[in-house]
Image (tube, rainbow, N blue to C red):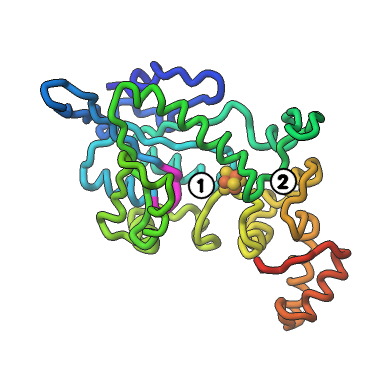
Protein backbone atom coordinates (compact mmCIF):
# COMPACT_ATOMS: atom_id res chain seq x y z
CA UNK A 1 0.00 0.00 0.00
CA UNK A 2 1.32 3.41 -0.85
CA UNK A 3 1.47 5.76 2.07
CA UNK A 4 0.90 8.74 -0.18
CA UNK A 5 -2.53 7.26 -0.89
CA UNK A 6 -3.09 6.66 2.77
CA UNK A 7 -2.64 10.26 3.76
CA UNK A 8 -3.76 12.23 0.76
CA UNK A 9 -7.36 11.99 1.92
CA UNK A 10 -6.72 14.17 4.95
CA UNK A 11 -7.49 17.79 4.48
CA UNK A 12 -5.03 19.90 6.42
CA UNK A 13 -6.05 23.25 5.00
CA UNK A 14 -6.19 26.26 7.26
CA UNK A 15 -3.15 25.65 9.35
CA UNK A 16 -0.90 22.81 8.45
CA UNK A 17 0.91 21.09 5.70
CA UNK A 18 2.37 17.65 5.63
CA UNK A 19 5.02 15.83 3.76
CA UNK A 20 6.70 12.50 4.03
CA UNK A 21 10.34 11.87 4.70
CA UNK A 22 11.70 9.00 2.67
CA UNK A 23 10.75 8.23 -0.86
CA UNK A 24 10.24 4.55 -0.17
CA UNK A 25 6.50 4.13 -0.34
CA UNK A 26 6.28 0.39 -0.37
CA UNK A 27 7.33 0.11 3.24
CA UNK A 28 7.47 -3.25 4.89
CA UNK A 29 6.60 -1.69 8.20
CA UNK A 30 3.79 0.63 7.44
CA UNK A 31 1.08 -1.85 7.01
CA UNK A 32 -2.56 -1.43 7.67
CA UNK A 33 -2.53 -3.45 10.82
CA UNK A 34 -6.00 -2.43 11.75
CA UNK A 35 -7.98 -5.12 13.41
CA UNK A 36 -11.59 -5.18 14.27
CA UNK A 37 -13.06 -4.60 17.70
CA UNK A 38 -16.41 -6.15 18.37
CA UNK A 39 -18.77 -4.15 20.55
CA UNK A 40 -21.74 -6.42 21.20
CA UNK A 41 -23.09 -7.29 17.79
CA UNK A 42 -21.99 -4.03 16.26
CA UNK A 43 -18.81 -3.67 14.34
CA UNK A 44 -16.79 -0.86 15.86
CA UNK A 45 -13.90 1.24 14.51
CA UNK A 46 -10.66 -0.25 13.28
CA UNK A 47 -7.52 0.26 15.29
CA UNK A 48 -4.88 2.68 14.01
CA UNK A 49 -1.38 2.61 15.50
CA UNK A 50 0.33 5.98 15.46
CA UNK A 51 3.86 6.54 16.72
CA UNK A 52 4.60 10.02 18.08
CA UNK A 53 8.11 10.67 16.90
CA UNK A 54 10.13 13.74 17.87
CA UNK A 55 13.53 12.39 16.78
CA UNK A 56 14.81 12.55 20.37
CA UNK A 57 16.49 9.61 22.09
CA UNK A 58 13.33 8.29 23.78
CA UNK A 59 11.00 8.33 20.81
CA UNK A 60 13.80 6.98 18.59
CA UNK A 61 14.42 4.09 21.03
CA UNK A 62 10.67 3.44 21.15
CA UNK A 63 10.37 3.38 17.36
CA UNK A 64 13.42 1.13 16.93
CA UNK A 65 12.12 -1.19 19.67
CA UNK A 66 8.73 -1.42 17.99
CA UNK A 67 10.37 -2.21 14.66
CA UNK A 68 12.57 -4.84 16.29
CA UNK A 69 9.52 -6.45 17.93
CA UNK A 70 7.59 -6.25 14.65
CA UNK A 71 4.81 -4.31 16.30
CA UNK A 72 2.14 -2.94 13.94
CA UNK A 73 2.67 0.68 12.89
CA UNK A 74 0.31 2.63 10.66
CA UNK A 75 1.87 6.09 10.89
CA UNK A 76 5.02 7.65 12.33
CA UNK A 77 4.15 11.27 13.00
CA UNK A 78 6.67 14.08 13.39
CA UNK A 79 5.29 17.53 14.36
CA UNK A 80 7.89 19.86 12.94
CA UNK A 81 8.21 23.25 14.65
CA UNK A 82 11.02 24.21 12.29
CA UNK A 83 13.15 24.78 15.39
CA UNK A 84 15.02 21.53 15.69
CA UNK A 85 18.81 21.53 15.67
CA UNK A 86 20.16 20.78 12.17
CA UNK A 87 21.64 17.56 13.62
CA UNK A 88 18.14 16.49 14.65
CA UNK A 89 16.80 16.93 11.13
CA UNK A 90 19.77 14.90 9.83
CA UNK A 91 18.96 12.21 12.38
CA UNK A 92 15.28 12.02 11.37
CA UNK A 93 16.21 11.66 7.70
CA UNK A 94 18.77 9.00 8.66
CA UNK A 95 16.17 7.00 10.63
CA UNK A 96 13.77 7.10 7.68
CA UNK A 97 16.44 5.96 5.24
CA UNK A 98 18.14 3.31 7.34
CA UNK A 99 14.96 1.75 8.70
CA UNK A 100 13.28 2.01 5.31
CA UNK A 101 10.21 3.67 6.76
CA UNK A 102 8.08 6.67 5.95
CA UNK A 103 7.85 9.44 8.52
CA UNK A 104 4.95 11.84 8.12
CA UNK A 105 5.97 15.40 8.89
CA UNK A 106 3.30 17.95 9.76
CA UNK A 107 4.01 21.65 9.98
CA UNK A 108 2.05 24.80 10.75
CA UNK A 109 1.53 27.12 7.79
CA UNK A 110 3.54 29.98 9.38
CA UNK A 111 7.10 29.79 10.67
CA UNK A 112 8.18 30.56 14.23
CA UNK A 113 10.20 33.53 12.97
CA UNK A 114 7.18 35.04 11.22
CA UNK A 115 4.91 34.57 14.24
CA UNK A 116 7.58 35.89 16.62
CA UNK A 117 8.36 39.05 14.69
CA UNK A 118 5.96 39.87 11.88
CA UNK A 119 2.53 38.47 12.64
CA UNK A 120 0.12 41.38 13.26
CA UNK A 121 -2.65 41.01 15.79
CA UNK A 122 -4.90 43.08 18.00
CA UNK A 123 -4.09 43.25 21.72
CA UNK A 124 -7.11 41.93 23.68
CA UNK A 125 -6.68 44.47 26.47
CA UNK A 126 -5.71 47.69 24.73
CA UNK A 127 -7.03 47.06 21.20
CA UNK A 128 -3.71 48.20 19.71
CA UNK A 129 -2.06 46.30 16.88
CA UNK A 130 0.91 44.26 18.04
CA UNK A 131 3.74 43.20 15.82
CA UNK A 132 4.55 39.54 16.48
CA UNK A 133 3.76 37.30 19.46
CA UNK A 134 7.34 37.86 20.62
CA UNK A 135 9.20 35.42 22.89
CA UNK A 136 7.09 32.76 24.58
CA UNK A 137 7.07 32.55 28.37
CA UNK A 138 5.83 30.10 30.98
CA UNK A 139 2.26 31.39 30.67
CA UNK A 140 2.43 32.30 26.99
CA UNK A 141 3.56 29.22 25.13
CA UNK A 142 1.91 30.24 21.91
CA UNK A 143 4.47 28.22 19.95
CA UNK A 144 3.46 24.96 21.60
CA UNK A 145 -0.18 25.49 20.73
CA UNK A 146 0.37 26.89 17.22
CA UNK A 147 3.35 24.92 16.00
CA UNK A 148 2.79 21.59 17.74
CA UNK A 149 -0.76 21.03 18.99
CA UNK A 150 -2.80 22.70 16.27
CA UNK A 151 -1.35 20.90 13.22
CA UNK A 152 -1.35 17.66 15.17
CA UNK A 153 -5.01 17.94 16.11
CA UNK A 154 -5.93 18.86 12.54
CA UNK A 155 -4.12 15.79 11.34
CA UNK A 156 -5.64 13.48 13.94
CA UNK A 157 -9.26 14.71 13.88
CA UNK A 158 -10.32 13.00 10.63
CA UNK A 159 -8.38 9.88 11.58
CA UNK A 160 -10.20 9.65 14.91
CA UNK A 161 -13.54 9.87 13.13
CA UNK A 162 -12.68 6.77 11.21
CA UNK A 163 -10.42 4.77 13.52
CA UNK A 164 -9.61 4.02 17.13
CA UNK A 165 -6.32 5.90 17.10
CA UNK A 166 -3.78 4.55 19.60
CA UNK A 167 -0.74 6.74 20.10
CA UNK A 168 2.62 5.32 21.13
CA UNK A 169 4.36 7.90 23.29
CA UNK A 170 8.05 7.75 24.29
CA UNK A 171 7.96 8.29 28.04
CA UNK A 172 10.91 6.52 29.65
CA UNK A 173 10.61 4.20 32.65
CA UNK A 174 12.35 6.74 34.91
CA UNK A 175 9.96 9.53 33.90
CA UNK A 176 6.84 8.14 35.56
CA UNK A 177 6.09 11.57 37.04
CA UNK A 178 5.12 12.67 33.50
CA UNK A 179 2.14 10.30 33.68
CA UNK A 180 0.65 12.54 36.38
CA UNK A 181 0.14 15.28 33.78
CA UNK A 182 -3.37 15.48 32.42
CA UNK A 183 -2.17 15.33 28.81
CA UNK A 184 -0.53 11.97 29.50
CA UNK A 185 -3.59 10.34 31.04
CA UNK A 186 -5.25 9.63 27.75
CA UNK A 187 -6.54 6.01 27.64
CA UNK A 188 -5.54 5.89 23.96
CA UNK A 189 -1.89 6.51 24.82
CA UNK A 190 0.50 3.57 25.07
CA UNK A 191 3.92 3.81 26.70
CA UNK A 192 6.11 0.94 25.45
CA UNK A 193 9.32 2.21 27.09
CA UNK A 194 7.66 1.93 30.51
CA UNK A 195 6.46 -1.58 29.67
CA UNK A 196 9.97 -2.53 28.56
CA UNK A 197 11.56 -0.89 31.63
CA UNK A 198 13.80 1.35 29.51
CA UNK A 199 15.15 4.42 31.27
CA UNK A 200 16.38 7.56 29.49
CA UNK A 201 19.97 6.37 29.62
CA UNK A 202 18.95 2.89 28.34
CA UNK A 203 17.26 4.63 25.40
CA UNK A 204 20.36 6.63 24.52
CA UNK A 205 22.59 3.57 24.84
CA UNK A 206 20.26 1.50 22.64
CA UNK A 207 20.19 4.22 19.95
CA UNK A 208 23.99 4.50 20.00
CA UNK A 209 24.22 0.70 19.67
CA UNK A 210 21.90 0.88 16.67
CA UNK A 211 24.24 3.39 15.04
CA UNK A 212 22.45 6.68 15.78
CA UNK A 213 24.54 9.41 17.43
CA UNK A 214 22.87 12.71 16.37
CA UNK A 215 26.34 13.99 15.39
CA UNK A 216 27.12 14.40 19.08
CA UNK A 217 24.06 16.46 20.05
CA UNK A 218 23.47 14.39 23.20
CA UNK A 219 27.06 14.91 24.28
CA UNK A 220 26.13 18.56 24.82
CA UNK A 221 22.49 18.31 25.90
CA UNK A 222 20.73 15.87 28.19
CA UNK A 223 17.39 16.74 26.58
CA UNK A 224 16.97 18.27 23.16
CA UNK A 225 14.17 20.68 22.35
CA UNK A 226 13.74 23.83 20.24
CA UNK A 227 17.19 25.41 20.02
CA UNK A 228 15.85 28.95 20.55
CA UNK A 229 13.57 28.25 23.53
CA UNK A 230 13.79 31.04 26.14
CA UNK A 231 12.60 28.55 28.76
CA UNK A 232 15.90 26.68 28.64
CA UNK A 233 18.28 26.94 31.57
CA UNK A 234 21.32 29.25 31.47
CA UNK A 235 23.48 26.12 31.32
CA UNK A 236 21.78 25.01 28.10
CA UNK A 237 21.99 28.49 26.59
CA UNK A 238 25.69 28.53 27.45
CA UNK A 239 26.09 25.32 25.42
CA UNK A 240 24.17 26.82 22.53
CA UNK A 241 26.50 29.85 22.62
CA UNK A 242 29.59 27.66 22.79
CA UNK A 243 28.79 24.86 20.33
CA UNK A 244 26.32 26.39 17.86
CA UNK A 245 27.58 29.90 17.00
CA UNK A 246 25.43 30.19 13.87
CA UNK A 247 22.25 29.48 15.80
CA UNK A 248 23.39 31.92 18.46
CA UNK A 249 23.74 34.67 15.85
CA UNK A 250 20.22 33.91 14.64
CA UNK A 251 18.95 34.11 18.22
CA UNK A 252 20.58 37.54 18.65
CA UNK A 253 19.11 38.76 15.40
CA UNK A 254 15.58 37.65 16.34
CA UNK A 255 15.94 39.17 19.78
CA UNK A 256 16.92 42.52 18.28
CA UNK A 257 13.75 42.52 16.14
CA UNK A 258 11.12 41.69 18.73
CA UNK A 259 9.52 43.58 21.60
CA UNK A 260 9.48 41.21 24.61
CA UNK A 261 12.64 40.46 26.62
CA UNK A 262 14.09 37.04 25.81
CA UNK A 263 14.06 36.15 29.51
CA UNK A 264 13.00 38.03 32.60
CA UNK A 265 16.63 38.35 33.68
CA UNK A 266 18.63 38.69 30.46
CA UNK A 267 18.24 39.60 26.84
CA UNK A 268 20.38 37.66 24.35
CA UNK A 269 23.04 40.38 24.12
CA UNK A 270 23.40 40.40 27.91
CA UNK A 271 23.68 36.62 27.98
CA UNK A 272 26.47 36.84 25.45
CA UNK A 273 28.27 39.42 27.60
CA UNK A 274 27.90 37.13 30.58
CA UNK A 275 29.34 34.14 28.71
CA UNK A 276 32.29 36.19 27.40
CA UNK A 277 33.01 37.36 30.94
CA UNK A 278 32.73 33.79 32.25
CA UNK A 279 35.30 32.63 29.69
CA UNK A 280 37.65 35.42 30.71
CA UNK A 281 37.40 34.42 34.36
CA UNK A 282 37.80 30.72 33.65
CA UNK A 283 40.93 31.36 31.60
CA UNK A 284 42.31 33.30 34.60
CA UNK A 285 41.46 30.41 36.94
CA UNK A 286 38.62 32.33 38.61
CA UNK A 287 35.24 31.00 39.65
CA UNK A 288 32.04 31.80 37.75
CA UNK A 289 29.87 31.58 40.82
CA UNK A 290 29.76 33.65 43.98
CA UNK A 291 29.27 37.31 44.86
CA UNK A 292 32.42 38.63 43.16
CA UNK A 293 31.44 37.09 39.90
CA UNK A 294 27.86 38.38 39.96
CA UNK A 295 28.83 41.89 41.09
CA UNK A 296 31.39 42.30 38.34
CA UNK A 297 29.17 40.67 35.73
CA UNK A 298 26.27 42.98 36.60
CA UNK A 299 28.38 46.03 36.26
CA UNK A 300 29.68 44.79 32.89
CA UNK A 301 26.30 44.23 31.37
CA UNK A 302 25.02 47.46 32.79
CA UNK A 303 22.42 46.47 35.33
CA UNK A 304 18.99 45.04 34.89
CA UNK A 305 19.77 41.56 36.21
CA UNK A 306 17.57 40.72 39.13
CA UNK A 307 17.71 36.98 39.53
CA UNK A 308 20.40 34.33 39.11
CA UNK A 309 18.39 31.25 40.00
CA UNK A 310 19.01 29.45 36.75
CA UNK A 311 22.78 29.75 36.61
S1 LIG B 1 10.20 24.10 23.50
FE1 LIG B 1 10.03 26.32 23.90
S2 LIG B 1 10.16 27.27 21.85
FE2 LIG B 1 9.69 25.07 21.54
S3 LIG B 1 7.48 24.97 21.40
FE3 LIG B 1 8.00 24.60 23.56
S4 LIG B 1 7.93 26.64 24.55
FE4 LIG B 1 7.99 26.95 22.33
- Image quarter hosting the N terminus: top left
Compared to residue 61, the image places residue 10 above or below, namely above
Residue 31 in picture, x, y percent from top left: 25, 29
C-alpha distance separating marks 1 and 2: 18 Å
**In-image side of 26 versus 84 (left or right):** left
**Residue drawn at 47 percent across, 26 percent down:** 154
The residue range painted magenta reads: 53-58
> Among all residues in the image, which is located at the extreme bottom?
285
**SS state under label 1:** helix
Residue 85 shows up from this direction = no
To which residue does mark 1 refer? 88
Q: How crowded is mark 2: few (under 14 residues within 10 Å), some or many (20 or more)?
A: few
Residue 127 in picture, x, y percent from top left: 79, 29
Compared to residue 258, the image places residue 31 above or below, namely above
Q: In which quarter of the image is residue 239?
A: bottom right
Report the magenta stretch's main SS.
loop
**Residue drawn at 53 percent across, 48 percent down:** 87
> Among all residues in the image, which is located at the extreme left?
41
Residue nearest the observer in this picture, 213 or 123: 123
Q: Name the N-terminal-most of marks 1 and 2.
A: 1
Q: Residues within 10 Å of mark 1 (few under 14, many from 20)?
A: many
Compared to residue 36, the image places residue 200 above or below, namely below
**In-image side of 23 versus 235 (left or right):** left
Q: Quadrant of residue 197?
A: bottom left
Queried on whether the Cβ of the residue with tag 1 lies below 8 angstroms from ligand 1, the answer reads no
Residue 235 shows up from this direction = yes
> Among all residues in the image, which is located at the extreme front?
125
To which residue does mark 2 refer? 250
User: For residue 287: magenta?
Assistant: no
Amino acid sequence: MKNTDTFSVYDLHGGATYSTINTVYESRLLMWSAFVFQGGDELSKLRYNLVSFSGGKDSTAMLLGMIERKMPIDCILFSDTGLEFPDMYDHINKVAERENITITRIKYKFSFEYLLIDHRMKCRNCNKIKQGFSWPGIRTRWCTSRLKNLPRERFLRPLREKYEVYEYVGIAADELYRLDRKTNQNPYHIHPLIEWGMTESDCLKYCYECGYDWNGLYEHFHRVSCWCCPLQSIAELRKLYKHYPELWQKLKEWDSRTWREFRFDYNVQQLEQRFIYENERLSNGLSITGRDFYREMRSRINGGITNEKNS
